[in-house]
């Protein structure tokens, strides 16, 4: 595994956001990456904060606008400087979470936040080269605990 502390911190933040109900699709401040940014800057998810007030974003933009510039306009920008993930990793995390919101194959009663988080975990496993099945299972089980 590479960057194990970053992996653990990311999973911790996402578990807290899921169970504290501060995780939402389509909200720059409360999606998977939004919660990771908030935790890094404020020590906890802070959905009430305006993302545009968060410092250290390229061109004075929020991380989401910077990501859009990077992803679609192929501009070289720093998406979210506070995070220890590179731009491609941030885009992969964001897409993994948000695409579950649009997944028409999911049952209408499915918890799309949960499905999105399972997608994010798969991305984090890849980013951090997590091959140990016990670590993968333990990480997934943290989202199932009530």
Image (spheres, rainbow, N blue to C red):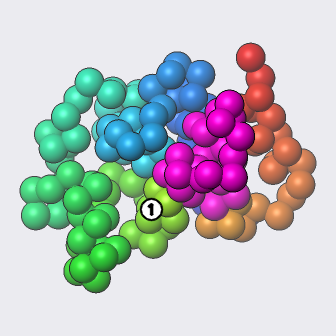
**Whether residue 20 is visible:** yes
Q: Which residue is drawn at 24% across and 79% down?
A: 73
- Judged by its main secondary structure, the magenta piece is helix
Circle 1 residue = 90
Q: What element carries label 1?
A: helix
Q: Give the range drawn in magenta.
A: 96-123
Residue 133's place in the image compared with 51, above or below, is below
Please state, as top left, top right, bottom left or bottom right, where the N terminus lies in the image. bottom right
Query: Callout 1: 10 Å neighbours few (<14), some, many (20+)?
Result: many
Relative image position of residue 101 (x, y in whole percent): 53, 46
Q: Does the magenta stretch include residue 26?
A: no
Please state, as top left, top right, bottom left or bottom right, where the C terminus lies in the image. top right
Relative image position of residue 75 (x, y in whole percent): 23, 80
Q: Residue at x 69, y 52 (%)?
A: 105
Q: Residue at x 22, y 41 (%)?
A: 51
Question: In the image, is 5 to the left or to the right of 78?
Answer: right
């Amino acid at each position: 595994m590479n960057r194990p502390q970053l992996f653990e911190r990311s999973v911790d933040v996402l578990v807290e956001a899921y169970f504290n109900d501060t995780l939402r699709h389509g909200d720059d401040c409360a999606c998977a990456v939004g919660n990771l940014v908030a935790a890094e800057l404020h020590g906890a998810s802070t959905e009430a904060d305006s993302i545009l007030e968060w410092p250290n974003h390229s061109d004075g933009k929020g991380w989401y606008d910077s990501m859009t510039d990077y992803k679609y306009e192929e501009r070289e920008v720093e998406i979210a400087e506070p995070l220890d993930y590179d731009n491609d990793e941030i885009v992969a995390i964001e897409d993994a979470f948000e695409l579950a919101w649009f997944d028409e194959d999911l049952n209408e009663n499915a918890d799309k936040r949960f499905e999105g988080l399972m997608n994010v975990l798969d991305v984090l496993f890849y980013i951090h080269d997590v091959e140990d099945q016990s670590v993968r299972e333990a990480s997934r089980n943290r989202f199932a605990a009530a």
